[in-house]
Amino acid sequence: MRPALPALRHFTLFLLFALWAGHTAAQLMTLEQCVDSALVNDRRVRMAALDEEMATVRIAEAQAGLIPKVRGAGEFRHYTDLPYQLLPSSFFGGPEGTYREIQFGTQQNINANVQAQMPLYDPQVWGAINMAKEGGRMADIQGERTREAVVLEVSHVYYNAQILKTRLAFLDSNVVNAEALVRRIELMHDQSLARGSDVDRLRLQREQLLTQRERVRSHYQQAMDALRVLIGAPVDSPLEVAASETAPPTATLSSGLGTGVRTAEQAMRLKVAELQLVKRSRIPSLNATGLYGTTGFGPIGAENRYDFYPIGFFGAQLQVPIFQGTVLGKRIKSKELELEHATLQRDAAMERDALERRTALREEALARRALADSRGQLELAERIRSSTVLQHAQGVASITDIVLADQAHREAQQNTIDALIQLRKAQLELTRLNGALLNTK
């Protein structure tokens, strides 16, 4: 059994290493995962969801105006002086044209009744329901705009982290090449085949690359910290973004409207509903009413009893607004001006949206062509650099030629990164204008 102990020890060490690696390895997050997490954890999204829920409750509140209303009432009266009533004196055998005051009734009255009222036709209630529904649609669009803003922010931060990661990979490769070139020139200098100034120049270039790499790495960590905050992850959680795509797909074109135009349109519809509600106050309303109760009189007799008598009725009530002053006319005029203002805002938003859409299409096509050109230039710069290093080894090219080729190579790398940034920005803007930002995965 003793020969099995080394194998068991190796297996235990391997298991502990695997567990340690699983806990310390950075989690690779895709853009879709980051967006989903942000839409769950972002406070702005949760507040927008509460606004949408409140709009739904307001619609239900307005619709409740169509439900019959039942009220219960009770009253107790103790008269210190019984009410007077004038009766004709002829009723008591007196002369015509004269009256006699009479006090009648009991000192205490008790009333208890239940009254019901149901709107048969109430234009104010229907107008309030329509306005609440339009307000609910506005809350939905505002919530969509909030979610779009979160998606845009997360996408910008994620793409920025991807770009920085790509730039860091370029710098890592450049540092490796610079280290190899410095060692080679140092060896040639030891053999008196290169000057000391050449070695110092290449060392300076290597140190500049190292400094630049550290700066980019710091920026990458800052971008990852911002991404952690947006998606609701702990600040010390190990996260990594996926590598940038070599050929980003073309943005999907659609005929949908962006949330900016839809917000302007919904604002116009809301003003129409408000104007209709004000105008409906001129229309008569009809309600069904009913009452049932009892009235008690007392105390009566030596036993101080109370006599109760029922009371009940049902009928209809018609309310016709005849004259409400000049307030209503001025309010209608104000709402008409607000509607005209909202219409102009809608038209301006549609024109602006069409212009931005054409601009985004041109920017996307231009950025895609620029990215293809920059990648071709990067491949050419890599071949030139490699051939220059080879020519230097053969004694044909100088150190200056190597430095110039290396600078051209880094410039081609930067142009590729810049073109990728412009393409990402144009695609995000085009997707937003198409109203498909929340549907893009």
Image (tube, rainbow, N blue to C red):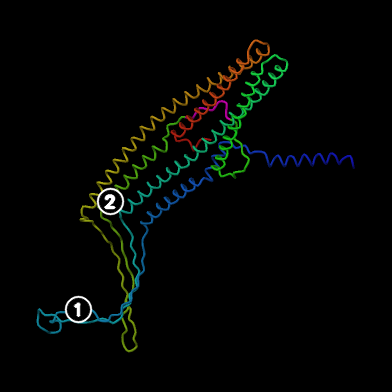
Residue 227 drawn above or below residue 245: below
Q: Is residue 67 within the magenta segment?
A: no
The segment highlighted magenta reads 244-252
At x 68%, y 18%, the residue is 185
Q: Residue furthest front?
A: 196
Which residue is tagged 2?
280
Going by the numbered disc 1, the residue's amino acid type is: Gln
Q: Is residue 13 left or right of residue 306?
A: right
For disc 2, the neighbor class at 10 Å (few under 14, some 14 to 19, many from 20) is: some
Rendered location of residue 353, percent (x, y): 39, 33
At x 42%, y 43%, the residue is 142
> Toward the viewer: 404 or 63?
404
Which residue is tagged 1?
85
Going by the numbered disc 2, the residue's amino acid type is: Arg
Mark 1 in CB contact with mark 2 (< 8 angstroms):
no
Residue 132 drawn above or below residue 82: above
Rendered location of residue 410, percent (x, y): 58, 22
At x 55%, y 43%, the residue is 229
